[in-house]
């Protein structure tokens, strides 16, 4: 158990955005929200999974919607309490812990805001070890845990609670409710018991994000190589370096898909997150492994929306959580789900 | 004829131009009194080449007054930030991430009111006129005469900002109002910040505009006066009274455009080598490429249209050390003429290397005659490598670009740079800023989210282009001359109905025959 103060949030937001593999939202807004909530409510207590009692009621809190909307229609601050109250109403139990469902610029900082607002401890873990675009794409789904009851809240005071037949239906219905709420909503879902955490979450993600954000900032301040520092911290390997020479985007079924070409034959394909990295057309890393794109000089994470002509980038491949490499994991988030026909191969063996 | 003036922190430069010919150039010291500095610069031009005031068809001024006022937090008006957004956005109120010093300078007056729109144009909440009247009476009680109004998604729907301005102005005649949709892009905090910065400069803008006007009247020039904007286009002085924030970073933009003009290139990299740093930018179709990342001005995060400029710590005054040879980032700066070896000092600088190698004739060459050949060669090669590196980083395509070298230290730029075409070293490079101001064009821009439902992508792009052209013409461009220089479309993830964010920029030559006031 340790305390997290507002000053530590910047590193966490940066590191989580790196783990977010191009998705997960703009870390700036998430960082401000968490910093302000901590300034008002005091430091957040971060607990490890094995410190959580077996009968604890652990609630992951997140934001759902379009990153472009979140930088314009900012949250109002009451959504977290509203979403937790709505969930508590159907659970009949009071949440004892907050959790993080996804590593990403926004969704790794919102749980800190939630913990600061409620005074509840936050579990040092997340539901993916990275970011994915859809609600059902989390390890709790593999562990047989239901997305619902799921609660959504907007800034107007609307709340909704969903009970769905499976986790894919939760994604569909929550997505349409989110669009009606103005394409940005605060959500609470995947209620976990304390004794389910080890099986359903990736332990230590928030600490990992903080260390990652800190080594990048330190390397930059010392004029060392931030990309090398990030790579060492991630245990990843350098897949590509180069300048972005072309970015083409298209919107299909509400998701921004696209490709980027790099100098020296490098290529990236993305759908909100980076999915595939290639060299001369040959795949060198594939979803669900992490494809982290950093600005080559600063080591700052680059979201897929910010990817543009002329950026100099370093692309790092990082092994995903081993549970994603099981047949069930690959069925949920493997290349096939995203419309590819290649077989997944672990990044370290390519 | 036209006159271009660049009012910098240290120097005021001016040029007299006729068409593409530079008739006279002058460099004077910037004065604390704005009027007399401009009068001195114009008088200097007249001394170099006599002309009748009536021959001058336009005067263009680039100024750093407004940037400096924000950086120094001086001469700023007490300003209220009014955001139309409730019940949304309360968690991050206006000026949330500002330096305390600037918040205090503006008085920290923040009002959150009902209003704002969703991404698809629905209202978040209706505008509450009674609420706005209560804000007006509070402003009156506090004696605040300047407001910045922002509304959620106002780049998609500006109605509430406009109506709020009408309501407040009806209550408070003479109120200075800045509206966010006229200033910034999607990204509420950044757009709102730019709007507040603009608002607090309004009083200063009036003073500066009056001072420039007085200066022209003093020398008998009646031609229209324009100010340079950060994207390399002009605004007339009346517009500048309302949008001073648009002048931010016009200096580097003018310098780049002036350099490109002097060399006759429209697609090139420009390296401006000063005493301490070298600044590199890239021009595409005659305009500086803009930075896409958020920019800090005096600690305020904004999404101003800023030129993408990369600086390295190498200039004419950079310190050189032996061992493994290093150059910069420490520099003797303005003390070059007393501390460099060739000027009788005791400090080895980049300029000394250039003189020792025989590529520059400055100061006393004998003072560097005994420098080890290897040190000179290695030092110059470090400089060449660093410059080649920064030029390569700024290129956006594999095609090599020509390079234009300007600035007092431009002699340090090697003749051959890998990955680039020829290095151009144009005449008049010392007044490239003022030339950039004198040749500036007029522009119009659209940046909005469009829903591709009823309209096709082509229709949306055509609509955006037509609006950008209209805006350029409204700003004073010759209608037959306006062209689209930039089209950028980004699909927006997770939004239904294939929403797309479109940015279009149009520019044209200034219509010199019609006065735009």
Image (spheres, grey):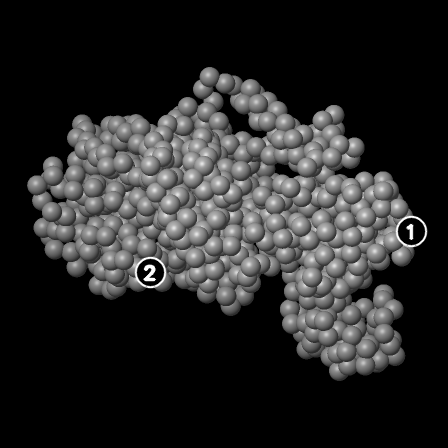
Q: Secondary structure at mark 2?
A: helix
Q: What residue is rendered at 75% in x and 64% in y? A: B29
Image quadrant in which you'd find residue B290: top right
Note whether residue B102 is visible: yes
| Residue denoted by label 1 | B50
Residue nearer the viewer, B504 or A266: B504
Residue bearing mark 2: A6
Q: Residue at x 55, y 36 (%)?
A: A247
Q: Residue at the top extreme?
A: B454
Q: Is residue A285 above or below residue B50?
A: above
For the residue labelled by badge 1, is the local secondary structure a helix, a strand or a loop? loop
Instruction: From the top left corner, tell me how far across and down residue A8 is, in percent.
Output: 35, 61
Q: Is residue A177 above or below residue B79?
A: above
Q: Is residue A277 visible?
A: no
Disc 1/disc 2 C-alpha distance (Å): 64 Å
Instruction: Give percent across and percent down for residue B124.
Output: 34, 33
Q: How far across and how far down the image is residue A214, in percent?
A: 41, 62
User: How many labels sit on residues?
Assistant: 2
Image quadrant assignment for residue B21: top right
**Chain bearing mark 1:** B
The mark lying in front, picked from 1 and 2, is: 1
Q: Is residue B226 left or right of residue A187?
A: right
The N terminus of chain A lies in quadrant: bottom left
Q: Relative to the observer, which residue lies in front, A96 or A129?
A: A96
Residue A236's disc is none
Residue found at x 45% / y 42%:
B172
Q: Position of residue B192 (x, y in %)?
A: 46, 45
Chain of the residue where label 2 is placed in the rendered structure: A
Q: Residues within 10 Å of mark 2 (few under 14, many from 20)?
A: some
Asked whether B145 or A81 is in front, the reply is B145
């Amino acid at each position: 158990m340790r305390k997290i103060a507002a000053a530590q949030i910047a590193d966490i937001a940066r590191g989580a955005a790196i783990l977010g593999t191009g998705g997960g939202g703009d870390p700036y807004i998430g960082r401000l929200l968490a910093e302000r909530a901590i300034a008002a409510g005091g430091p957040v207590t971060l607990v490890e999974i094995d410190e959580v009692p077996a009968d604890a009621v652990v609630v992951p809190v997140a934001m759902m919607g379009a990153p472009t909307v979140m930088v314009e229609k900012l949250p109002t601050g009451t959504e977290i309490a509203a979403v937790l109250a709505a969930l508590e109403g159907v659970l009949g139990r009071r949440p004892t812990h907050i959790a993080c469902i996804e590593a990403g610029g926004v969704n790794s900082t919102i749980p800190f805001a939630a913990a600061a607002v409620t005074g509840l401890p936050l579990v040092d873990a997340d539901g993916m070890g990275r970011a994915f675009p859809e609600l059902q794409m989390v390890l709790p789904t593999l562990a047989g845990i239901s997305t619902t009851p799921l609660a959504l809240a907007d800034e107007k005071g609307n709340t909704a609670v969903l009970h769905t037949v499976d986790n894919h239906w939760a994604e569909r219905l929550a997505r349409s409710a989110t669009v009606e709420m103005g394409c940005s909503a605060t959500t609470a879902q995947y209620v976990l018991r304390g004794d389910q955490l080890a099986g359903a979450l990736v332990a230590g993600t928030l600490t990992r994000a903080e260390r990652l954000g800190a080594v990048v900032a330190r390397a930059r301040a010392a004029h060392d190589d931030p990309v090398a520092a990030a790579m060492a911290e991630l245990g990843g390997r350098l897949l590509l370096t180069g300048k972005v020479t072309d970015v083409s985007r298209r919107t299909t079924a509400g998701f921004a898909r696209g490709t980027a070409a790099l100098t020296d034959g490098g290529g990236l394909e993305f759908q909100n997150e980076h999915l595939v990295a290639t060299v001369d057309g040959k795949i060198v890393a594939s979803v669900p492994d992490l494809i982290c794109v950093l600005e080559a000089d600063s080591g700052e994470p680059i979201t897929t929306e910010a990817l543009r002509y002329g950026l100099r980038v370093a692309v790092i491949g990082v092994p995903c959580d081993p549970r994603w490499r099981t047949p069930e994991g690959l069925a949920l988030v493997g290349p096939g789900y995203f419309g590819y026909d290649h077989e997944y191969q672990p990044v370290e063996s390519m | 004829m036209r006159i271009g003036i660049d009012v910098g922190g240290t120097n005021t430069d001016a040029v007299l131009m006729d068409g593409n010919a530079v008739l006279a150039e002058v460099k004077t010291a910037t004065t604390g009194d704005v009027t007399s500095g401009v009068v001195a610069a114009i008088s200097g031009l007249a001394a170099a080449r006599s002309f009748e005031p009536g021959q001058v068809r336009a005067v263009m001024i680039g100024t750093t007054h407004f940037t400096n006022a924000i950086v120094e937090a001086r001469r700023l008006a007490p300003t209220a930030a009014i955001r139309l957004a409730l019940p949304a956005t309360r968690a991050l109120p206006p000026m949330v991430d500002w330096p305390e010093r600037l918040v205090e300078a503006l008085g920290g007056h923040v009002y959150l009111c009902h209003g704002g729109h969703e991404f698809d144009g629905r209202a978040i909440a209706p505008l509450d006129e009674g609420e706005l009247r209560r804000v007006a009476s509070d402003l009156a009680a506090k004696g605040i005469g300047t407001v910045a109004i922002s509304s959620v998604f106002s780049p998609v729907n500006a109605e509430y900002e406009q109506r709020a301005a009408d309501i407040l102005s009806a209550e408070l005649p003479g109120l200075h109002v800045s509206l966010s949709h006229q200033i910034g892009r999607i990204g509420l905090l950044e757009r709102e910040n730019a709007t507040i910065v603009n608002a607090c400069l309004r009083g200063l803008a009036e003073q500066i505009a009056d001072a420039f006007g007085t200066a022209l009247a003093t020398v008998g020039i009646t031609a229209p006066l324009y100010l340079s904007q950060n994207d390399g286009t002009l605004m007339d002085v009346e517009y500048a009274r309302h949008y001073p924030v648009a002048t931010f970073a016009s200096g580097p933009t003018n310098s780049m455009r002036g350099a490109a003009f002097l060399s006759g290139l429209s697609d090139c990299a420009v390296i401006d080598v000063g005493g301490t740093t070298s600044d590199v930018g890239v021009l595409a179709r005659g305009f500086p490429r803009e930075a896409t990342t958020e920019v800090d001005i005096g600690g305020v995060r904004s999404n101003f249209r800023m030129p993408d400029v990369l600086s390295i710590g190498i200039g004419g005054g950079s310190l050189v050390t032996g061992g493994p040879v290093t150059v910069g980032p420490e520099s003797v700066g303005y003390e070059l003429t007393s501390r460099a070896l060739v000027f009788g000092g005791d400090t080895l600088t980049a300029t000394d290397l250039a003189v020792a190698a025989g590529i520059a004739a400055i100061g006393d060459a004998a003072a560097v005659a005994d420098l080890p050949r290897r040190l000179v060669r290695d030092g110059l090669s470090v400089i060449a490598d660093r410059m080649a590196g920064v030029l390569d980083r700024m290129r956006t395509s594999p095609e090599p670009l020509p390079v234009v070298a300007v600035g007092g230290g431009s002699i340090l730029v090697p003749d051959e740079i890998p990955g680039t075409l020829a290095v151009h070293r144009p005449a008049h490079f010392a007044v490239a800023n003022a030339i950039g101001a004198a040749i500036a064009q007029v522009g119009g821009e659209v940046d909005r989210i469009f829903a591709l439902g009823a309209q096709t992508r082509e229709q949306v792009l055509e609509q955006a282009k037509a609006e950008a052209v209209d805006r350029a013409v409204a700003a004073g461009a010759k209608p037959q001359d306006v062209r689209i220089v930039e089209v950028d479309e980004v699909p927006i993830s997770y939004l239904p109905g294939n929403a797309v964010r479109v940015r279009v920029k149009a520019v044209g030559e200034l219509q010199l025959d019609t006065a735009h006031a």
